[in-house]
Amino acid sequence: MAQLAGLSDVHFKRAPDDSEGDAYSLAPNVIVLSPSAQKLPSCQLAFVIGHEIVHIAQRHFDEDAIALSVYSGKPPYWTHDGDDAMQLANGDFGLALKLSPLWKQQEREADWLGSLLAAQVCGCSLEKGALAYFHPGDGDGGGIAAAHPPDTERIRQLIPFTESARRLMAMVPH
Ligand SMILES: [Zn+2]
């Protein structure tokens, strides 16, 4: 999947527990998987990994760092460290509010393109991948700046790509 997304190198790490969620990525090219994520059925895991690969391939860390710098009045490129930039939004609701549309767009991109990567590389349908992974109702919500939209919204946004995923699955050699 990384290769298809144009990345030459992605490193995987195991999280010690599930406290940080199923998976997350670290700049520039690390994907961290929780113990529960590693036990997911293969197509759900393919979706989770596809989602994180998209964050890395689309350089969302850099996008965040630049947007945070601009919105908080810092000089351009005051830091190259996405974590430094993220610290600006910690406890600053106004800044998080400004970033919220960008974060939402990044998560939509990661869900949509991640599903299609899983379809094309692993032959996973949306039904077996993303749609099986989401659990509407439990743990939905979060604040205005929450990283992921509620599962019901993620499902609604993905449904239109069901057919594209099916076409890409047909390209996987059997
Ligand atoms: Zn994400």
Image: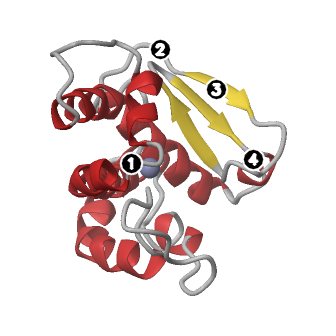
- Is 107 displayed left or right of 74 in the figure? right
| Residue at left offset 33%, top offset 13% | 79
Relative to 59, residue 130 above or below? below
Mark positioned earlier in the residue sequence (1 or 4): 4
Badge 1 marks a residue whose secondary structure is loop
Badge 4 marks a residue whose secondary structure is helix
**Do residues under tags 3 and 2 come within 8 Å of each other at their CB atoms?**
no
Q: Which residue is under mark 3?
A: 12
> As rendered, which of 107 and 171 lies closer to the eye?
107
> Of tags 1 and 3, which is closer to the observer?
1
Whole-percent x and y of residue 6?
Answer: 30, 23
| Residue at left offset 74%, top offset 45% | 34
**Do residues under tags 1 and 2 come within 8 Å of each other at their CB atoms?**
no
Q: Which residue is under mark 4?
A: 38
Quarter of the image with the N terminus in it? top left
User: Which quadrant holds residue 173?
Assistant: top left
Q: Can residue 1 be seen in this view?
A: no
Whole-percent x and y of residue 115?
Answer: 39, 56
Q: Residue 92 carries which label?
A: 1
> As rendered, which of 102 and 49 lies closer to the eye?
102
> Of tags 1 and 4, which is closer to the observer?
1
Mark positioned earlier in the residue sequence (1 or 2): 2
Q: Which residue is under mark 2?
A: 9
| Residue at left offset 54%, top offset 83% | 136
Which amino acid type is marked by label 2?
A: Asp
Q: Residues within 10 Å of mark 4 (few under 14, many from 20)?
A: some
> Of tags 1 and 2, which is closer to the observer?
1
